[in-house]
Image (cartoon, rainbow, N blue to C red):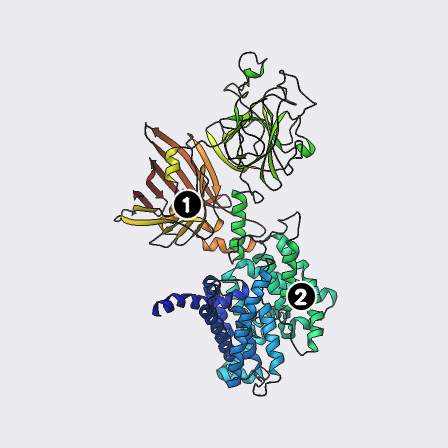
Amino acid sequence: MVEKIQKSLPVFIYGVLNSYSMIFFSKNKIFSMILLVVTFFDWIAGLSGLLAVIIANLTAILVGYNKDNTAQGYYGFNSLLVGLGIGIFYQPGFAFFFVLFFASLFTFFLTIWLEGYFGKYGLPYLSWPFLFGIWMVSLAAREFTSLQISERGIYLINDIYAYGGIRMVKVYEWINNLPIHESIILYFKSLGAIFFQYHLIAGVLVAIGLIIYSRIAFLLSLTGFFSAYVYYLFIGGNLGELSYDYIGFNYILTAIAIGGFFIVPSRYSFLWVILLTPIISFIITSTSAIFYSLQLSIFSLAFNLVVILFIYVLKFRERHFTRPELVAYQQFSPEKNLYSHNNYNSRFESAVQIPISLPFWGEWTVTQAHAGEHTHKDAWRHAWDFEIEDEDNEKFMEDGLLPKDYYCYNKPVSAPFDGTVQEIKDGIDDNKIGNINLEKNWGNTIIIKHAEQFYTKISHLKKDSFKVEKGAQVKRGEILANCGNSGRSPEPHIHFQVQTNPHIGSKTLDYPIAKYLLKTSTGYELKTFSRPEKGQVISNIGINDSLFQAFNFIPGQNITFEVEMDGSATESIDWEVKSDIYNNTYIECSKSSSKAWFKNDGALFYFTYFTGSRQSFLFYFYLGAYKVALGYYKNLVVNDTYPLAVFKNNFMYFWQDFVAPFYIFMKADYRLQYLKMVDDLSTSSVWLRSKAKLSLLKNTSREYSFDIYINGPRIERFSVKSEKMNLTAKEIKS
């Protein structure tokens, strides 16, 4: 029993705290504490809200609901709002606490029901449980003679005097007499009204907490409210709608939800915040007239209707998915949503679902790229032609009069990804050099289905060279046929394209190659999710066994390093490789509890996410081995970008956050170089060097240098250097 309580206590505590900040879509603990204090500006309301949160979270734990959802405050924030409302509207007493208990329980049940209902459509339930809960309690309470309406707030000066005497009254009068524009007063009071606290100071504290939690959210709150204020002035609307129960908080909450939480912050999300202002006004005006007849407030009804409606509408788009773009992975921070989104788009193309490879091995030259000068035109422009050239840029030996003189002729062609052979066209003879077959334009061709409405096509293949049959299952890299000179092909080459239909001659789809090596004048460069250009010499990644084994982290594997920092005594650091319920793999450090998520597709190892201490050895390994191609090529260069917040620079991040939806002036770059390899009969040793750099505009703010020494199947040595630290680690067990 004691053990169960110990396990549930952190869930309960976090659930109570997060219930406060979750009203602003946040899990920031400082923000939660500020909001908790704000609710106690009216101590009865504050106590009532706290009791409601405790009841909801205890019920969630005792009944057995998801612990993560409970700890994040999902099941508590609606009950909190109902508790605050009851605390404001009614006098405390036995009947009051009786109603509070069952109202909190009822709101919790509504939360579970609406979570399931809206979840079927991929929509949030927002504060609908609060609305239904507070309306039903308000209507029912009219028949409860033991429940008395509160008189607090009617004689505000008397209430303030009761709390703090004449000094508090003078402070209140001083604040009220400050030369502050009406709109600013309305803004702050609207913020406080979210928690039923209609005080200027309450709103100021909420605004401070909002800035601490998210600069973007604070900017959105200003955008939402003052868009409404200007709109009312422009149309000659009744500003009383903003001051009546300070219902203007609907504009604030809608702006934060639409501008930065459910949608990635951008100029488009801010534009929609402004465009939705009249719609919120329509709903406030119309529903207030209806609910007034029932003597009920609309509370957050307009916010709930507009947010649900807008998110639902966006889900049915057929194009322009980034204007604005829905958040794919929620991180409960507009800044994190934006920076992670930007980082993902810079590393991977967001539209890519299937990581296709080049359909050959070895180095080939792009002789015609997208929108080519010969045949890649109009609806068929997104395609490539590939041939092989020698060091003198010649495509053939001898006199080049026969197809067999060409280096690429009869070379194997491979599957770009796993799939099913959809179509094979065979039996077309090779052309003589310089001739073309316009009647059978595509020549011998194979089409592979990789997914619904996703096919790849390889054409101009050699007659009778197919190694597979129609309907066969193929794996990435499996040999399909050989390069030929059939169809509209004056000299041997292969034509490669992606298409949405299974037919030969279908229109092409603009789609990148997931990863390949680009040969440069100094070595090689890894390209990811890119489109090869004409004249480039490219290849797939050939695997080096030592690199593959060293970075082949398998769930259940334990790794131990001896780590020495700045000349201090060595310390053993233990890692364990794990996977979560979604089969995402990560490394966890037993000392710091830090976690680094990673992917390994057999040719490329890369980290995707990090949580935990930025002083841990795992964090430095995350920085230094951020992306590693598992093949050795001398002078190979791998470039990538980190999530912007990977380095700590609180002062600069503070200002970057404010302008981030419109302009990014900070960069966090990664660069890896392949220095040397020593091969013997059984294994090889590889030296790698990487750098992590934070830049402000064009100036370097912080830089780390990493050396990685791979010996056989393990990372034998890993070192980190910067201006302030020097770390060396040696793997002693794997």
Q: Nearer the viewer, residue 488 or 531?
A: 488
Is 663 or 469 nearer to us in this picture? 469
Residue 623: assigned label: 1
Task: Please tell me how many numbered marks the rendered image carries.
Answer: 2
* Residue kind at label 1, given as amino acid type: Leu
Q: Secondary structure at mark 2?
A: helix
Observer-nearest residue: 87 or 473? Answer: 473
What residue type is disc 2 on? Tyr
Q: Is residue 95 above or below residue 533?
A: below
Q: Residues within 10 Å of mark 2 (few under 14, many from 20)?
A: many
Q: Please tell me whether residue 327 is drawn above or below residue 197 in the rendered image.
A: above
**Earlier residue among tags 2 and 1:** 2
Residue 649 spot, x, y in % from top left? 45, 53
Looking at the image, residue 394 lies above or below residue 163: above
- Between residue 176 and residue 530, name the one nearer to us: 530
The location of residue 132, given as percent across then percent down, is 61, 72
Residue reaching furthest left? 569
The quadrant in which the N terminus is found is: bottom left
Q: Look at mark 2 in the image and give the residue it sits on.
A: 229
Q: Quadrant of residue 224?
A: bottom right
